[in-house]
Every structure is written in structure tokens, then in C-alpha cells.
Amino acid sequence: MQDTRISFEFFPPKTEKGREKLKRVRKELNKLQPEFFSVTYGAGGSTRDNTLGIVKGMLKEKLPTAPHLSFGGDSEDSMLELINIYKDMGVNRIVALRGDRPSGMGGPSKQLVYANELVEFIRKHTGDHFQLEVAAYPEVHPEAPGYVQDIRYLKGKFDAGANSALTQYFFNTDAYFYFIDECAKEGIDQPIYPGIMPITNFVNLARFSDACGAEIPRWIRKKLDSYGDNVEAIAAFGEEFISRFCEKLLAGGAPGLHFYTMNNLEPTTTIVNNIRSN
Ligand code: FAD
């Protein structure tokens, strides 16, 4: 497990306090020697400057940093400008996404640019400069026309030049292993890294999961429910369960792990240490 690839995802904090906290968190998490840290990009480009600012700060600290990127409502010119800024800053990895419309935007709006088109755009303008990560959905993207089609669209992202994929989070190892087998049948041989969501708060997790189509198994819902607002008990269960879950994924052949840290040091640190000590 020591040399298994791990990566950590952050979102750009909106407050000075949040930014200070993130500085401390990334300094500590860097001791775990991740392959890279990624920084999310708001739907519709709403946090474009926030993402850029955080990425700049992280590069100054010599941290391997991968901005997430999506067209949102941007023109090709402004997208290219941003990609070139990243290139000039020394970024060599991008997480290329379609993104979602910001909530509340409403009304008819421009068709979002699919991730395969963004990958193609980046390759067209910058060749092989960037390592490109894309998103994958072992439990199917909520808007996908179907299971098989969603895998074909993932294949389209690899055919356009993506190097590897990071998955939406899930809590069922079978969903991942079946997905990997189906991807292989479709001709996908690039690595697909499971996205790992630590469990710390039932209400937030349930809300998030409903929105992104990740299933929380009934027994986990019931278990978390039974703890009520005993956050220590939820944290202890979450750490134990997610550590074992990660071990099963790695033992079954997962090439590494991508952690949704939610900008927190814990429980990600404990989970990584748990799996590395076995
Ligand atoms: P796509 O791969 O473009 O797929 C979108 C939908 O369209 C799917 O249903 C797919 O089946 C279908 N589809 C794909 N290609 C085609 C095509 N060519 N023709 C027709 N249909 C097609 N969101 C953010 O806003 N900011 C972030 O920073 C962010 N980071 C993420 C990181 C990870 C690891 C993951 C897994 C998700 C992240 N998301 C983020 C969420 C993501 O943007 C949403 O799930 C979004 O709805 C889909 O993005 P995508 O890149 O997977 O889209």
C-alpha cells in the first residue's frame, strides 16, 4: 500500500478563515505524499477566480496541484486563456469535467460542454502537456440515458485523450468492481481511481448523495441514524468502515484512491494511516 497512488481533493474556501485552515490542512496532508491535490471548480465557472487563487498559492508551496475545469458558460477564448495561465504557472494535470449548472440559474441556457469535448479542446491546444483526469460513475451519472451508454461516454473521454479517471464516491465495492469489468469489455484499459468520501455527518452525506446519485446502503443509513447526533460515534464508525472499504478496493485491484477531503485533515489522515499500516 505504501506506493499506491493517493490524491486529495479540496474545494476553494470562500472566507479568509477557510483559506488559512486549508493552508494548514494541505501542509499536513502533504506529509502523506499524495501524487497530487485537486481543487474543484464551481458550476458555471462561479468560483473560477477562487480556484485559480488557491492553485496559485499551492504551486508557490511547491505542492503538486490539479485544478478542476469545466466550460460552464465560458467562451472558447476565455477557456483557452485560463488553460494557458495554468500551463504557464507550471500546472501539469487537470481534472476535465462538464460540470453542472449553478443551482438557481434556471431558465433555458446554453448546452453544457461535455467533458469529452473539453478533453479534445485541451489536447488540441496544448498537446500532451497536461495529464488529464476525467470523472467516472460506478453507480451511473444521474442524467445518463443508461448504464451502458454512460460507459460509452466514458470511453469517449479516453478516446479524446484522457489519461485516467476519478470516480464519484460510492459505498459498495461490488458497484466498482462490476463497473471496472464492464469498462474493460468496452475497451477501456486506463486506470480508474475510486473516489472515497469519508463519513462524518449523516445529514450532509444524505443530501449530497441524493444530488449526485451515490447510494448509501440501507444498513449504513440505519446505522448512522441510530447514532443520532453523537458525532464521535459516527466518526468512529466512519473511520473504521471506510478504512476497511479502501482495503477491500485495493486488495481487489483498485490502482489507488482519490479522497474527497472536504478540506479537513481528519478522517482522511487516519484512514490513510490505517490502510498503510496493514
Ligand atoms: P460528462 O462526462 O460530460 O457527462 C455528463 C452526462 O452526459 C452524463 O450523464 C453522460 O452519460 C452524458 N454524456 C457524456 N458525454 C456525452 C456526449 N458526448 N453526448 C451525450 N451525452 C453525453 N462538478 C463541478 O461543478 N465542479 C467540480 O470541480 C467537480 N469535480 C468533480 C470531480 C469528480 C472526481 C467527479 C466524479 C465529479 C465532479 N463534479 C464537479 C461533478 C460533475 O461535474 C457532474 O457530475 C456533472 O454533472 C458531469 O460531469 P462529467 O464531467 O462527468 O460530464
Image (cartoon, rainbow, N blue to C red):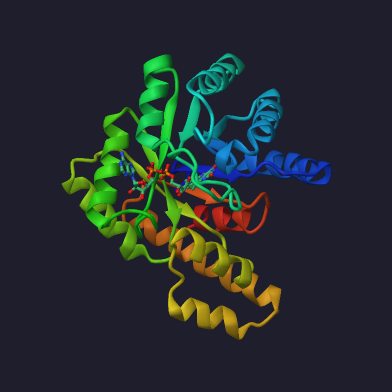
Q: Give the quadrant of ligand 1.
A: top left
Q: Is residue 227 visible?
A: yes
Could you say which quadrant of the image residue 164 lies in? top left
Q: Number of numbered discs present?
A: 0
Could you say which quadrant of the image residue 44 lies in? top right
87 relative to 125 in the view: left or right: right
Could you say which quadrant of the image residue 166 lies in? top left
User: Residue at coordinates 49% horizontally, 76% vertically from top-left?
Assistant: 220
User: Residue at coordinates 46% horizontally, 52% vertically from top-left?
Assistant: 195
Q: Is residue 26 above or below residue 86?
A: below
Residue 2 appears at what percent x and percent y?
A: 48, 45
Q: Residue furthest right?
A: 17
Q: Is residue 39 visible?
A: no
Q: Residue furthest front?
A: 107
Of 231 and 47, the residue lying toward us: 47
Residue 198 appears at what percent x and percent y?
A: 56, 60
Q: Is residue 152 above or below residue 73?
A: below
Of 53 and 171, the residue lying toward us: 53
Q: Is residue 35 above or below residue 205?
A: above
Residue 85 appears at what percent x and percent y?
A: 59, 17
User: Residue at coordinates 63% horizontally, 33% vertically from top-left?
Assistant: 48
Residue 19 appears at what percent x and percent y?
A: 77, 41
